[in-house]
Amino acid sequence: MTAIEPAADDREWLAFRDTLEKAIGVPLGAYKEPQMKRRLAAVMARRGVADWTAFAAAIKAQPPLLNEVRDTLTINVSEFFRQPERFSDLQQRIFPALMEKRKQLKIWSAGCSIGCEPYTLAMILNEIDPRGGHTILATDVDIPILSRARDGRAYLASEVRSVPEPVLKKYFTREGETYAVNDTVKRMVTFRHHDLLKDPYPSDLDVILCRNVVIYFTEQAKHVIYTGFTQALRPGGYLFVGGSELISRSRDLGLKTDGTSLYHRAA
Ligand SMILES: C[S@@+](CC[C@H](N)C(=O)[O-])C[C@H]1O[C@@H](n2cnc3c(N)ncnc32)[C@H](O)[C@@H]1O
């Protein structure tokens, strides 16, 4: 029996995807294809590149173009206290309840981008338990963005717009038009490179935040990631997802919903 050959357009696309995958080291088969193609097509249009084959050649020849493509795929938009009411819930209800059972919490911000999310966690933990010695691990697949996050500066006014005024005064320094986080906060966060699609997950976590990351992934990839998160949590630990994200078949995974964007691992 003859195998069905992909059409020429598909072959070009698959060859391009293979080149890109090798160049950025991210398994692109897990990303939703129509969205990924739309975003890449926008870069091609901007750069006047005619087709996938020419795009693959251009990527190999021009490292800055590769960075642009990586940024397009990973989308690093973030801000401090994104969905502020969710962070109030963590500060007022979730963290104090967890601390009654365990003195030092282990928290993971997965897909941390420029660091706004883990630094927000550091600020609220410092408010409720300044000498707690809690662990905040912050990871991302994008290495250049991690070095920006570690640097902890050059945040725009739009990225600090939801920070309550007293918190802004206490934990940030204004540097011209931008903002830097102070050393107390920086010391509380450990940044590390990690690909949610292929690297092993940490274990015994009290809280995982993974917000606005899996929206780019296929249902199958999401299922693998949420299964990994559930196993990485201690029983009773919390998983905090993005505002528009729902975990399908969460009960089958052993997760219970706990209000908007929040799940916990059944004890
Ligand atoms: C829109 S940002 C979300 C930042 C933050 N969590 C928030 O909600 O403000 C998405 C981040 O997911 C990261 N990302 C994309 N694919 C990833 C993967 N396979 N593993 C880890 N991080 C990934 C991107 O590099 C990007 O920094």
Image (spheres, rainbow, N blue to C red):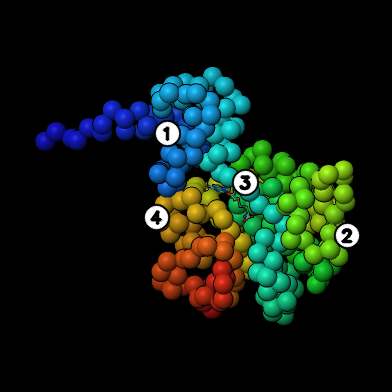
In the visual, does 248 lie left or right of 266? left
Q: Residue at x 72, y 42 (%)?
A: 148
N-term-proximal mark, 4 vs 1: 1
156 or 241, nearer to the observer: 156
Disc 4 secondary structure class: helix
| Mark in front: 3 vs 4 | 3
Residue indicated by mark 1: 17
Observer able to see residue 137: no
Label 4 is placed on what type of residue?
A: Gln
Q: Quadrant of residue 171?
A: bottom right
Residue 169: x, y in percent?
88, 59
Residue indicated by mark 4: 220
Residue indicated by mark 3: 76
Q: Residues within 10 Å of mark 4 (few under 14, many from 20)?
A: few
Q: CA distance from mark 4 to mark 1?
A: 19 Å
Label 1 is placed on what type of residue?
A: Arg
Disc 2 secondary structure class: helix
N-term-proximal mark, 3 vs 4: 3
Label 3 is placed on what type of residue?
A: Asn
Label 2 is placed on what type of residue?
A: Lys
Residue 240: x, y in percent?
59, 66
In the visual, does 10 lie left or right of 129? left
Q: Looking at the picture, does residue 222 appear above or below residue 46?
A: below
Q: Quadrant of residue 165?
A: bottom right
Q: Is the CB of the residue bearing disc 3 within 8 angstroms of ligand 1?
A: yes
Residue indicated by mark 2: 169
Observer able to see residue 65: yes
Residue 14: x, y in percent?
36, 33
Q: Residue at x 54, y 19 (%)?
A: 61
